Amino acid sequence: RIASGKTTPIMSEGAGTKSAAKNARSDAVKASKKKPDPEGLALLDDGDKAMAEKDFAKATELFVAAKEKCESSTTAAAMPKTKKEKQPPTEKQLAQMAAQSAANGVGADAETSVAGREQKLVLKPAAENQQAKPLRPDVDAAHNYALNTAEQHAAYLRSTGGGIRTRFPPEPNGYLHIGHAKAMNFNFGQARLSREAGMQGETVMRFDDTNPAAEKQEFIDSILDNVRWLGHTPMCVTYSSDYFQQLYELAVQLIREGKAFICHQTGEQIKAERMALQVYHGKTKVEAKEVGKPAPPLPKEAASPFRTRAVEENLRLFERMRAGRYGEGEAVLRMKGDLLSENSSLWDPAAYRVLFHAHPRTGDAWCIYPTYDFTHCIVDSLENISHSLCTLEFGQRQAVDGPYYWLLHALHLYKPATWEYSRLNLTHTLMSKRKLKFLVTGGYVEGWDDPRLPTLDGLRRRGFSASVINRFCDEIGVTKAAMTAKWELLEYVARSALDAAAPRRSAVLD
């Protein structure tokens, strides 16, 4: 241990191993960071050279010496690193964020707030909506049903002022849940952003009440109460049933133009027809293309046998439907779409069906009711909606070559812009209104306001405030990428709100 009057550190057994050298080096590095003694750093470098030469015993000895030298050094401790203050993103970073946003499905309509360093989705103005939906590369001009004529677009801008007008259109067949709060936040929020930008911004509260068998006034009252509770103020409250007469007249117009027909097929027959179409598009056409042959004609079983009926016959039969001369399921008005289209939503969707149910608003005035596919787009156009915002499951219907735009094109009506986003999913939470209704009607829970349910009434009873739910919707944002939010995030938002607002008391107990 004694050499030239100097002491050297005692080496433990196993000091010549690579593992011991690495451990000794780790300790030396930690000591050098606290007190970067020059001699200790030199010993550390020599130890690294010995490690490179695989002289692990010598390396261990040098690392131990470096550690001791640094620990006993009078060199001032290294200054802790100061945290750099975050700077607002540069123009280049903003462009990268926008590109990343587009890759995640937010689209070209996303703008970024520099001050808040967060992305806010802002819809493009109505003045840019002549092409209501971006044209896909695989769709030719003949099937681009989403293009407004210059005259249609100019007339729309004159009548509305070119602002943002959205709509919140729930079906009154149950109580709203937190997923509907996200939809409200998006629709009413876009109108608010438009007003903040100095433009017109408004939202229509519309009830999609076209299925009287499942709708009740109780549900309508509850929905209106939820909208008020969350702090949203619609420009007006409308109902799809307000347009029943106009919808009926437009259906007659569609028949007169040869674009709709009365069909008497059963549900099973229509299903078999669609299966034949799937085989044709998924196999027959593909095989013909592979061998360089033109696509064969549609097989007979792929189309309704009633599709070629004369216009006058269809008009007479539709009037019989209107008069209640057919039972439920015996006759249906179908749009004569495009069976050669790759978009299966355009394979002759239903437009009107027979339902002998009293309507909550119109009573027994009607026994035929329009379907969602027929009603949704027409009422959007009649109400001068600029942007129709729906969840992703409606994307195929609202494609440029889908029934939404096909029907408006066939009826020569203005075409609003459509935009799809992912629905809200919560971990360990049932979000299907149909399944929630099963729990309520089956007596498994205490009602729609049971605090175990994600309904807005249930969350309200559980203690969540409107501001918490709105803040939660802001936190999760809006994208086209499928997402599942954690229930813990909702609880975190609630705790943060309570931490800032809840009263606190202290007491000294005797």
Image: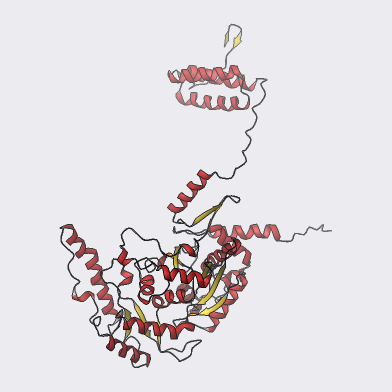
Above or below, comparing residue 2 to residue 423 in the picture: above
Residue visible at 62% across and 72% down?
Answer: 229
Residue visible at 26% across and 79% down?
Answer: 269
Residue visible at 36% across and 83% down?
Answer: 253
Quadrant position of residue 334: bottom left
Q: Nearer the viewer, residue 134 or 353?
A: 134
Q: Is residue 167 visible?
A: no
Outermost residue, top side:
4
Q: Nearer the viewer, residue 399 or 447?
A: 399
Above or below, comparing residue 195 to residue 383 in the picture: above
Above or below, comparing residue 273 to residue 146 in the picture: below
What colouring does the structure picture have? secondary structure
Q: Is residue 353 shown left or right of residue 45?
A: left
Q: Position of residue 330 (x, y in %)?
A: 31, 87
Q: Position of residue 319 (x, y in %)?
A: 34, 90
Q: Position of residue 423 (x, y in %)?
A: 47, 64
Quadrant position of residue 197: bottom right
* Quadrant the N terminus occupies: top right
Query: How many numbered dots are placed on residues in this image?
Result: 0
Q: Nearer the viewer, residue 270 or 324?
A: 324
Outermost residue, right side:
510
Q: Is residue 227 shown left or right of residue 270?
A: right
Q: Is residue 331 visible?
A: yes
* Quadrant the C terminus occupies: bottom right
Q: Nearer the viewer, residue 29 or 88?
A: 88
Q: Position of residue 323 (x, y in %)?
A: 37, 93
